């Protein structure tokens, strides 16, 4: 049990890709560690400052400040591209 042997078979090969399995809880604990969560929030604030100058990243965007969505853009494009009779 403590001395596994892997025999390489040219015809079928050996899948070593699943040799190490990490429990999902350990991945979750790593991703949601307090310092990483704080770092992600800081990056989000910086991104908001760069993309929307003059906005305070601590307050949510109002309806008029919301970024243009694909659906809203397509609707506006349909309105302006209609042929006038």
Image: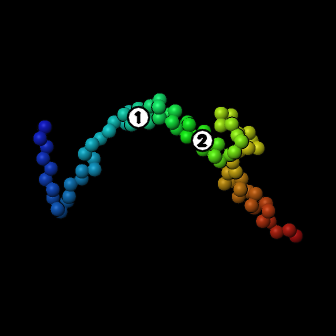
Q: Position of residue 74 (x, y in %)?
A: 70, 58
Residue drawn 65% across and 33% down?
A: 58
In the picture of the structure, the residue carrying the numbered disc 1 is 30
**Residue that sits furthest to the top in the current view:** 34
Outermost residue to the right? 85
Distance (Cα) linking label 2 and label 1: 23 Å
Marks 1 and 2: in contact by CB < 8 Å?
Answer: no
**Secondary structure found at label 2:** helix
Q: Residues within 10 Å of mark 1 (few under 14, many from 20)?
A: few
Q: Considering only order in the chain, which callout, 1 or 2, is on the residue closer to the N terminus?
A: 1
Q: Residue at x 38, y 33 (%)?
A: 25
Circle count: 2
Q: Are there few (<14), some (14-19), or many (20+) residues within 10 Å of tag 2?
A: few
Which quadrant is the C terminus positioned in? bottom right
Whether residue 60 is visible, yes or no, is: no
Residue 9 in the image: above or below residue 29: below
Nearest-to-viewer mark from 2 and 1: 2
Nearer to me, 35 or 27? 35
Image color mode: rainbow
Quadrant in the picture for residue 76: bottom right
Q: Position of residue 75 (x, y in %)?
A: 74, 56
59, 82: nearer the viewer: 59
Secondary structure type for disc 1: helix
Q: Residue at x 70, y 40 (%)?
A: 55
Specify whether residue 48 is in view.
Answer: yes
Please tell me whether residue 37 is drawn above or below residue 54 in the rendered image: above
Is 25 displayed left or right of 67 in the figure?
left
| Residue 65: quadrant of the picture | top right
Residue 33 figure quarter: top left
- Asked if residue 12 lies left or right of residue 31, the reply is left
Which residue is label 2 attached to?
46
């Amino acid at each position: 049990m403590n001395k596994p042997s892997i025999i390489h078979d040219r015809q079928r090969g050996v899948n070593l890709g699943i040799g190490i399995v990490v429990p999902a809880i350990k991945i979750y604990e790593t991703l949601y560690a307090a310092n990483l969560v704080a770092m992600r929030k800081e990056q989000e604030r910086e991104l908001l400052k760069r993309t929307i100058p003059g906005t305070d990243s601590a307050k949510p965007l109002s309806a008029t400040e919301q970024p243009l969505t694909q659906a809203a853009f397509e609707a506006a494009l349909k309105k302006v591209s209609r042929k006038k009779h």
